[in-house]
Image (cartoon, rainbow, N blue to C red):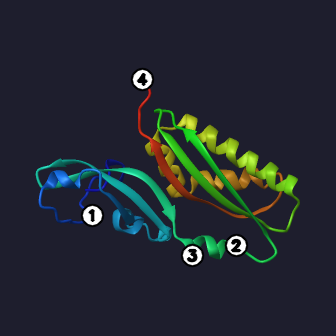
Amino acid sequence: MAPEMFGGKQIGETLAADPKQLIGRTLNVSLIDISRNYSKFFVKLRIRISSIDGNKAHTKLVGHECMRERIYRMVQRHGRRVDAVQEVVTKDGVHVRVKTVFMLIKRVGSSTKNDTRKLASDLIEEAAKKAKLEDFINSVIEGDLQHKLKKDCSKIYPVGSIEIRKTEVIDEKVAAA
């Protein structure tokens, strides 16, 4: 079954001698299979089986990844690729590693690259602090966060394209409320 944030519908079948052996198994599923959103064909979700209820295996989201071809297509000859990797904590206390890549439209010096990378990292951290894990991942998948990053980072230097290429849930301990 898909995670609850995607409607909890059936997305596939798997075999096991004992259903308890399925708990902890990680699966890669295309976003098309879950949401029928064909504009995001390049997004793969990573889900982990968390519990078994009869013949149904319930899952939870542990991250997403963009296909390599999407990133290769973004990178162009006379631009400058900027990568940023950071760990953020969401409002509900979940640690998430976020990997961002974006293209500046021309070759620039390292200070401009560093300034845009720093601004993007600050904006992602701020967005994560304000949202729960599901809302944060949803804004990444829908492209809302990338749109905001592109708009704000273009104030430093024009950004050609931007993508959060990967998110990984590092630590699922929920902070004591």
Q: Position of residue 156 (x, y in %)?
A: 83, 52
Secondary structure of residue under mark 3: helix
Q: How many marks?
A: 4
Q: Amino acid at mark 2?
A: Val
Q: Residue at x 84, y 68 (%)?
A: 106
* Residues tagged 1 and 2 counted as in contact (Cβ below 8 A): no
3D distance between C-alphas at marks 2 and 3: 10 Å
The residue that label 2 is drawn on is 75
Question: Does label 4 or label 1 sit earlier along the sequence?
Answer: 1
The residue that label 3 is drawn on is 69
Q: Position of residue 142 (x, y in %)?
A: 51, 57
Q: Residues within 10 Å of mark 1 (few under 14, many from 20)?
A: few
Q: Position of residue 123 (x, y in %)?
A: 67, 43
3D distance between C-alphas at marks 2 and 4: 42 Å
Indicate which disc residue 176 carries.
Answer: 4
Secondary structure of residue under mark 4: loop
Q: Position of residue 151 (x, y in %)?
A: 72, 53
The residue that label 1 is drawn on is 11
Image-based side of 95 in relation to 74, left or right = left
Q: Residues within 10 Å of mark 4 (few under 14, many from 20)?
A: few
